[in-house]
Image: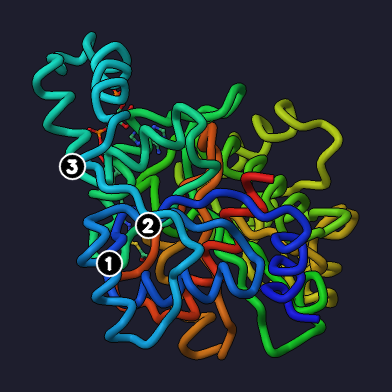
Amino acid sequence: MSVIERIKEKARANPRRIVLPEGDEPRTVEAAARARAEGLALPILLGNAAAIEAVARHRGVDIGDIDIVDPAGSAKAGDYAQALHELRKAKGVTREQAAELVADPMYYGIMMVKLGDADGLVSGAVHTTGDMLRPALQIIKTRPGMKVVSSSFLMDCPNKSLGEDGLLVYADCVVVPCPTAEELAHIAVAAADTARTLCGVRQPRVALLSFSTKGSAKHELVDKVRLATEMAHALAPELLLDGEMQLDAAIIPEIGASKAAGSPVAGRANVLIFPDLQAGNIGYKLTQRIGGAECFAVLQGLAKPCNDLSRGCSVEDIVNTIAITAVQAG
Ligand code: ACO
């Protein structure tokens, strides 16, 4: 069974309320109908009911049993505005500004998650990554003990000898442009947690990647990865984790054995930590476009699950992300 099929099976066992702020966006409406029909989640569409129903009719999908909430006419808008003002007043957000913000479905949806009226959120078919991430970072915040919000990409590779039966978890590919050593350590621990809890990987083996393996090159960038490895060990002493390491030493057994003999992960890593966002973002796209891997993005480290879509996403991508978010919420 593929990674995403396993995730969908878990989602079906415990369907959660997932709010979709881009509620009248056609792919989103169709994805909500499919997710509901497949029992993956209880989607909530935000927006004007008449407009959403018109989109559903046009796409030929049934949304009869899906909740629609219009932030414009909502009885809860006042409570959400007050709560948002309380959360952000130290940052200068007045009661009036908070009321304007919650009229925006993106902020309204985030407040639903924050206050427990939804279990998770999926957005980004229209919004940019930054516009989706900022309210989540400002309002949902990191979960206890986690220093930074980041992302993992679940890479389902055609070569099943790699990683965990072809699954490699890459981090961070979306959020933190230039992580400090401490942030990199937190990203490593969060990615191992994603591998375990979302993908069912029993034994995450985490490699912190570099252009050097175990001191083969000297540079301050290498020192940062080495320091991050030490910090990650201190954060999660039970985790199988090693670095700094080149990609081939991390995933090819013979090269791992020769370049990093005795390493608990070399040659068998299933979680790969990239030193910065340029490396991570380029790395996942190479694996997808040249390596032919299927990939699924997930945000990690937030106190409650919110996930971003690509603006070029398909209906299938949205359904998958709804399932991923539902499992994170469970
Ligand atoms: N983790 C936790 N909190 C964070 C993080 C983080 N990674 N980044 C910012 N914050 C917090 C800040 O502390 C701040 O909190 P506060 O307002 O309570 O003090 C709040 O979020 C806003 O911070 P800003 O610095 O104002 O936010 P910024 O404008 O830097 O935006 C963002 C943050 C959007 C994540 C930015 O780092 C970014 O644009 N990252 C890259 C996104 C991107 O374009 N990715 C690649 C494309 S996506 C793809 O290829 C699939």
Residue bearing the label numbered 1: 52
Q: Amino acid at mark 1?
A: Ile
Say whether residue 211 is left or right of residue 141: right
Residue 169 lies in what quarter of the image?
bottom right
Q: What is the C-alpha distance between the residues marked 3 and 1? A: 14 Å
Amino acid, disc 3:
Ala
Give the colour scheme shown: rainbow
Q: Residue 144: x and y, percent?
A: 59, 22
How many other residues sit within 10 Å of disc 2, few (<14), some (14-19) or many (≥20)?
many
Q: Residue at x 20, y 15 (%)?
A: 91
Residue at 36 percent across and 28 percent down: it is 139
How far is mark 3 from mark 2, CA to CA? 13 Å
**How many numbered marks have been drawn onto this rendered protein structure?**
3
Is 301 or 43 nearer to us in this picture? 43
In the rendered structure, are the residues bearing label 1 and label 2 in contact, judged by CB atoms less than 8 Å apart?
A: yes
Say which residue label 3 marks: 72
Residue 45's tag is 2
Q: Give x and y (percent) for residue 27.
A: 35, 77
Mark 2: amino acid? Leu
Does residue 165 lie above or below 263 as drawn? below
Instruction: Give the position of the C terminus as an image quadrant.
Output: top right
Helix, strand or loop under label 1: helix
Q: In terms of sequence position, does the residue under pointer 3 or pointer 2 come before the other? A: 2
Nearest to the observer: residue 210 or residue 119:
119
Q: Secondary structure at mark 3?
A: helix
Q: Is residue 76 visible?
A: yes
- What residue is shown at x 17% (from left), y 38% (from top)? 103
Please report whichever mark, 3 or 1, sits nearer to the chain's N-terminal start. Answer: 1
